[in-house]
Image (spheres, helix red, strand yellow):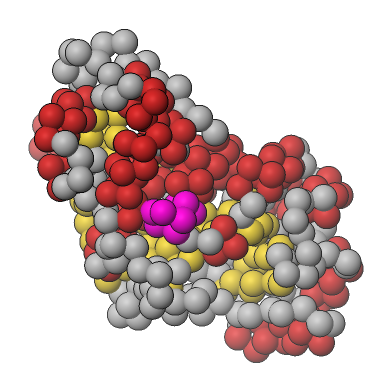
Amino acid sequence: MSATLDLSRATQKAATPVNLSGLTREGLRQALIDADICPPEKARMRASQIWGWIHNHGVTDFDAMSNVARDTREKLAAVFTLARPEIVERQVSNDGTRKWLIRTAPGIEIETVYIPDVGRAGALCVSSQVGCTLNCTFCHTGTQKLVRNLTAAEIVAQVQVARDDLGEWPSPKEDRRLSNIVFMGMGEPLYNLDNVADAIDIISDNEGIALSRRRITVSTSGVVPQLQALGERTQAMLAISLHATNDPLRDVLVPLNKKYDLEALMAGIRAYPGLSNARRVTFEYVMLKGVNDSPEEARALLNLIKGIPAKINLIPFNPWPGTDYQCSDWKTIERFAAILNKAGYASPIRTPRGRDILAACGQLKSESEKVRASTLRRAEQDAA
C-alpha cells in the first residue's frame, strides 16, 4: 500500500519530521520525489539504497549512508528522520524474556516483549494500538482505554528496538535470535489493518529485515469483515483469540462476539486466503478454572473447529490484580490437551514467560500504568 505524504512545506522545518522507517518501498520512493531529494527517474534506485541502510543495516543517522552523496544526505536530514523512539524502561525476566516500555510521542507508550526459544529461535510480541477497545474480561491489557492506532513507523520501531538490543544488524540470514513476529501485544490489529499491513510489507522485505511472512502471525479477537483483507494483503499466519466454544460464554469473555458470533467467525476462518495444512490457523484458548476447562468444553471445541486446518495453543491464565478469574489446575489443562491431541490436533500448553516482569499474555503495560497512576496520586496529594 503506498503512502501519501503532504510535503508541501518541506522547505520549512517540520515540527515532526516523517520517519522513513515507516514507509513502504513505494512510499519511500514517492517521498523522495515530493521532497525534491531526487528526480523521479532516479527515485527508485535512491530509495533502494536508503532502504538497505535503514532495514538491513539499522542505521539511525543519514551520515552513515556511505554510498549516498553528502549533499543528498544533508537534504534527507533536513526533511526526514530515522530516530528511534525513547526507551523508558527495559526489563529482563528470570527466564530471559525482555520487555521494553517505549515512548513514541508525548503520552504515547507501548510495551513490546521478546520471548526466547519460541518459533524457530525467538518471537517478538508487538503492539498495534495504544490501549484496546475490546474489553475482554480475562485480559488486563484490555481494561486500558484506547488512545489511538499506532503508525506503521511505530510498529516497525518495536522490531528495530528489539534488534538493537539483540545486536542483530545487519540483518542476519542465519542464526537469528529474533525469528518470528506475533501481533499479540496491545490492541486489535484488524482495527488498524492499513498500518499493520504496511509494517508487515516492511518487515518481510527481502532486502531489509527479511522475515518470512510465514513467520509473522496476526492475532485477532474476531473482526470478521477484515479477515479476507488481512489474508490477501499480508499473507500472514492467522491466530484467533477464541477462549470459548459457545456464544453465551464468549459474549462474556470476548464481548466482540456479540457483534460477530461464532458462526460468523468460523465461516470467516474457513474462507481465510491460503488456509491449508501447511498454513494452519492457531486457536488461542486461555484456561480459566471452572469456566471453560472441562472435558465437555474440550469436545465442544473439537466440534466447533472440525475440518479447519488448525493447532490450539492452550494458555494458562496469567493473573493480575483485581481479576476474579483463576488459572486452571495443571492436571485439568493436561487432561484438556490430551482430548485435543487424541483427536489429531497439536495442542501445546504455552509455558508462561515473563510473569515476574508482567510481560506474559494479557499483562502488557499494566505495571507502567500502575506506576504512573501512583505518581499522579502523589502529585495530587502534594498539591492539596
Image location (x, y in percent) of residue 188? 56, 45
The quarter of the rendered structure image containing the N terminus is: top right
Residue 374 versus residue 62: which sits nearer the camera?
A: 62
Image location (x, y in percent) of residue 337? 71, 82
Rendering quarter of residue 314: bottom right
Tell me: residue 346, above or below residue 272.
below
In the rendered structure, does residue 205 fall within the stretch colored magenta? yes
Residue 336 relative to residue 196: left or right? right
Give the residues drawn in magenta, as a range: 203-210
In the rendered structure, does residue 125 fall within the stretch colored magenta? no
* Residue occupying image coordinates x 63% and y 59%: 237
Image location (x, y in percent) of residue 280? 72, 66
Task: Give the farthest residue toward the front.
Answer: 41
* Residue occupying image coordinates x 12% and y 35%: 70
Tell me: residue 110, above or below residue 173.
above
Q: Is residue 126 visible?
A: no
* Residue occupying image coordinates x 20% and y 13%: 11
